[in-house]
Amino acid sequence: MKKILVIEDEEAVRENLIDLLDAENFSVLGAPDGCAGVDLAQEHLPDLIICDIMMPKLDGFGVLTALRKEPSTATIPFVFLSARSDKNDWRHGMELGADDYVTKPFTAEELLRAISARFEKQATLDQQQAQKLDWFRNSITKSLPHAMRSPLTHILGFSQFIVEEADTLERQDIKEMAGKISKSAERLHKLIQNFLLYAELELISTDPDRIKTLRNSQVKSAASAIEMIVWDWAKRVDRGADVDMDLQDSTIQIAKIRLEKIVAEIIDNAFKYSSGGTPIRVLSTIIYQGNPAKPFYALSITDKGCGMTGSQIAQLEAHQQFERKLYEQTGSGLGLMISKRLAQLLGGELTIESIPNQETTVRVILPI
């Protein structure tokens, strides 16, 4: 049974709507004002919301804005009811994310037709989402063996050679081949871990509750955490002298392990695709964006390396490339895709600006 929430301050109208929908075999909740409506929506997660615009405490526009900000209620179909027929009101409602706008007075048939249209559209979206998940699972099945083949070939080849020629090999030769086996194993392990993490993030993106859980963690001192990660990676490649950091501190909305993953992938690429002795600039600051403006933590990492072309950046912008060339890029592709997806799920973003053979800046924005 579909559940519908009616938010209407006029008691007679609200009761009439509840009776009408109840007679159509819907499970119906009623709220007398916008604030109560937001609370009920977050508590019961209805399948559809019908909401008046002009109400005390919080009007319909405020209700829709509040619900669209929360992952658990962001995609619930929303229908406005209003005696106001001004086109500006209609346009404003649509810009906020409303799905339909029914003008009072209306007939029962008009309202039920609007409700039916919303449910049909939602069913189509659900079907498309299911198809996307099926495609994604198939993509993993096809892509994982291809991505594994190169490091696995090195592991098998060198290990087999050692087994067959152990009696004739010098100690130094065995040591060198063992080192190559170890390096290939580390690469293979990272590939598998990244595949699994990306798959997890794609599944999280379809579940509002898991998105909400992802956003519940905090890092109290972003600057300290970022500084520790950057110096750790700089030490690994002996490029501490190349790093220039200027970090503003803040509490940010992300688990420490997720922040470590994002920063590690970006700084690893910066070192990997630039030469020793060239600068790596790590900068963070607090910015304000959105309407109303909210604070975000902006981290940018700039290197003077080989850079990326516009087409390479475009591939990262469209994660539909998953099945094709993404995993042919054993360098920056997958790691940056994971970082970008994490930022998006946390309510932020990742952008790349690059001039080939000159400079690349990767910028991550995360909620405070």
Image: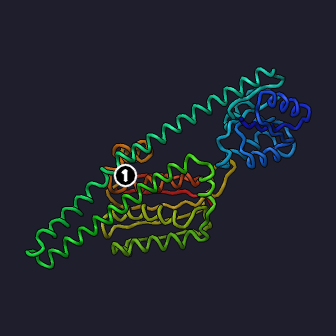
Pick the residue in front: 142 or 214.
142
- The spot of residue 118 in percent (x, y) is 67, 30
Q: Which quarter of the figure has residue 10?
A: top right
Relative placement, left or right, of 172 versus 76 is left
* Residue plotted at (39% across, 47% down): 140
Q: Is residue 309 visible?
A: no
Any part of residue 50 in sight: yes
Taking the spot 71% from the left edge, 35% from the top edge, the residue there is 2
Of the pair 253 and 196, the residue shown nearer to us: 196
Disc 1 marks which amino acid? Ile
Quarter holding the N terminus is top right
Is 336 left, or right, of 7 in this rendering? Answer: left
For mark 1, does the 10 Å Cα neighbourhood hold few (<14), some (14 to 19), or many (20 or more) residues? some
- Point out the residue furthest to the right here: 12
Q: Please name the residue that numbered disc 1 is placed on.
A: 355
368 to the left or right of 245: right
Picture coordinates of residue 70 (x, y %)?
A: 67, 49
138 or 338: nearer the eye? 138
